[in-house]
Image (spheres, helix red, strand yellow):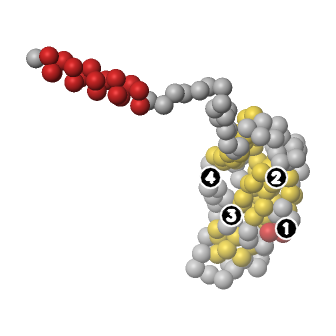
């Protein structure tokens, strides 16, 4: 009986002695990873059917939410031509426009541009509109493309 009581006490002592000491003074502070998160709602926009030649189609407002824990140079918009599904036609960037609401002006996606000025850390929300000018050169069909929002380099 004595043997059984001594062994557990000895094992507990060995385990307790083998736990390393934690020193809070020498531990480095936790590293916080920088992040910038950009979300759009809806993530897909349907401009509907072209009803006549030289038609202009405008989207409903697209909501943009930017959350960041670091400052950055703002949000840049860029795009690719709209390509016809199952065909060879495309609508060039010179006829695809984006505008920031409420008072921004439409700008062509021919060259990427800033939708916002420099942004500090935090959460920012705004809306954009997308507009496409169709011409007599495009044949009827579905055209798809991508508009990309990216954060500018940190200041």
Cβ–Cβ under 8 Å for marks 1 and 2: no
Q: CA distance from mark 4 to mark 3?
A: 10 Å
Q: CA distance from mark 4 to mark 1?
A: 21 Å
Query: Around disc 2, counting alpha carbons within 10 Å, would you say few (fewer than 14), some (14 to 19), or many (20 or more)?
Result: some
Q: Residue at x 64, y 75 (%)?
A: 84
Of badges 4 and 2, the one in the foreground is 2
Of badges 3 and 2, the one in the foreground is 2
Give the labeled residue for mark 1: 110
Nearest to the observer: residue 79 or residue 9: 9
Give the labeled residue for mark 4: 43
Q: Residue at x 41, y 31 (%)?
A: 18
Q: CA distance from mark 1 to mark 2?
A: 18 Å
Of all residues, the one furthest to the left in this rendering is 1
Query: Around disc 3, counting alpha carbons within 10 Å, would you say few (fewer than 14), some (14 to 19), or many (20 or more)?
Result: few
Give the labeled residue for mark 2: 152
Q: Choose the circle earlier in sequence order: 1 or 3.
A: 1
Q: CA distance from mark 3 to mark 2?
A: 19 Å
Q: Is residue 69 above or below residue 3?
A: below
- Helix, strand or loop at label 1? It is loop
Give the labeled residue for mark 3: 146
Cβ–Cβ under 8 Å for marks 1 and 3: no
Q: Choose the circle earlier in sequence order: 4 or 3.
A: 4
Rendering quarter of residue 37: top right
Q: Choose the circle earlier in sequence order: 4 or 1.
A: 4
Residue 36: % across, % down: 71, 45
């Amino acid at each position: 009986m004595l043997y059984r009581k001594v062994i557990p006490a000895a094992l507990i002592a060995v385990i307790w002695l083998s736990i390393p000491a934690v020193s809070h003074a020498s531990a480095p502070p936790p590293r916080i990873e920088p992040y910038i998160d950009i979300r759009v709602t809806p993530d897909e926009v349907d401009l509907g059917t072209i009803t006549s030649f030289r038609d202009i189609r405008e989207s409903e407002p697209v909501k943009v939410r930017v959350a960041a824990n670091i400052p950055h140079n703002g949000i840049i918009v860029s795009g690719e031509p709209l390509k016809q599904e199952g065909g060879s036609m495309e609508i060039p960037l010179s006829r695809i426009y984006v505008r920031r609401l409420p008072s921004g002006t439409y700008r062509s996606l021919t060259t990427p541009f800033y939708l916002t000025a420099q942004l500090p850390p935090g959460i920012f929300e705004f809306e954009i509109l997308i507009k496409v000018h169709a011409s007599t050169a495009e044949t009827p069909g579905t055209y798809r493309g991508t508009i990309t929002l990216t954060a500018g380099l940190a200041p």
